[in-house]
Amino acid sequence: MKLRYKFRLILDESLSYGVLGSRCAGLTDLQSVDPNEIDMIIGSLSGPLCAGGGFCAGSKEVVEHQRITSSAYTFSAALPAILAVTASSTIGMVQDGQELVKVLKENVKAMREQLDPRSNWVRCSSVPENPILLLIIKDEHVKARGLTYGDQELLMQEVVDDVSLPVACAATIGYGTEADDS
C-alpha cells in the first residue's frame, strides 16, 4: 500500500525497542521486517530502557528533513548526561547479555501466568512476547455491571492507587511490620 499510494511508513518503537525480538531491536526484529522498508523509525528511550531522549532513524533524506524541521525542539531542552549514559549502557547490556533477555522473557511469562487466566477480573490483551502487560477488565464484568469506559478507568486507577500506598511499600521491604516492633 505504501508504494501504491506513495505514503511514508513511520514506525514508533517507543515501547518495543529494547524488549521485543530476538535481539531486542523492536517490532522489525520480532516480525523479521527489513528496517530499510520503513521510511522512518522513531522512539523514546524513556520506556523500556528507563532513560531519556529519543531517536529518529531512516534514510539520509528523511533524517535530514527531521533535523531541519525540528531544530526548535532539539535546542529547547538538553538531555541530562546521566540519561544519555543510561540509554547507552542499557542498550549495551541488552546487546551483550542474552542471559538478561532470557530472564526478561521468563519474568514476563511468569507474570502473565499469574494474571491471565487466573484473574477473575482482568485479562491481559498484550501479545505473549510483549513485556508490557496491558490489563483490561474482563468483558463479562463490564457487561454485568454496565461499566462505561470512564468507570473502568476509575476502577483501574483505584487498583494502582491501592498498590502504590506507602504502607504497602514499607511492609513489602520490611518496614513498619510487627516484626520490627519486637
Image: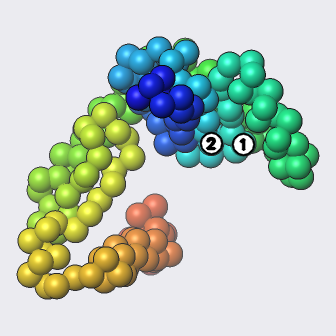
What element does badge 1 sit on? loop
Instruction: Tell me whether circle 2 and circle 1 mark residues in contact (CB < 8 Å).
Output: yes
- Say which residue label 2 marks: 44
**Residue visible at 37% across and 24% down in the picture:** 30
Residue closest to the eye, 103 or 60 = 60
Horizontally, residue 23 falls left or right of residue 137, namely right
- In this rendering, the count of numbered labels is 2
What element does badge 2 sit on? strand
Q: Earlier in the sequence, mark 2 or mark 1?
A: 2
- Say which residue label 1 marks: 53
Horizontally, residue 75 falls left or right of residue 162, namely right
**Residue visible at 41% across and 64% down in the picture:** 172
Horizontally, residue 101 falls left or right of residue 118, namely right
Horizontally, residue 127 falls left or right of residue 94, namely left
Residue 24 placed where, x, y %? 47, 24
Compared with 73, 95 (above or below) is above
Residue closest to the eye, 35 or 23 = 35
Residue 181 placed where, x, y %? 44, 78
Screen quadrant of the C terminus = bottom left
Question: Residue 63 lies in what quarter of the image?
Answer: top right
**Residue visible at 68% across and 19% down in the picture:** 59
Q: Amino acid at mark 2?
A: Ser
Residue 163 placed where, x, y %? 39, 71
Report how far apart the C-alphas of labels 2 and 1 lie in the structure.
6 Å
Residue closest to the eye, 175 or 45 = 45
Q: Amino acid at mark 1?
A: Gly
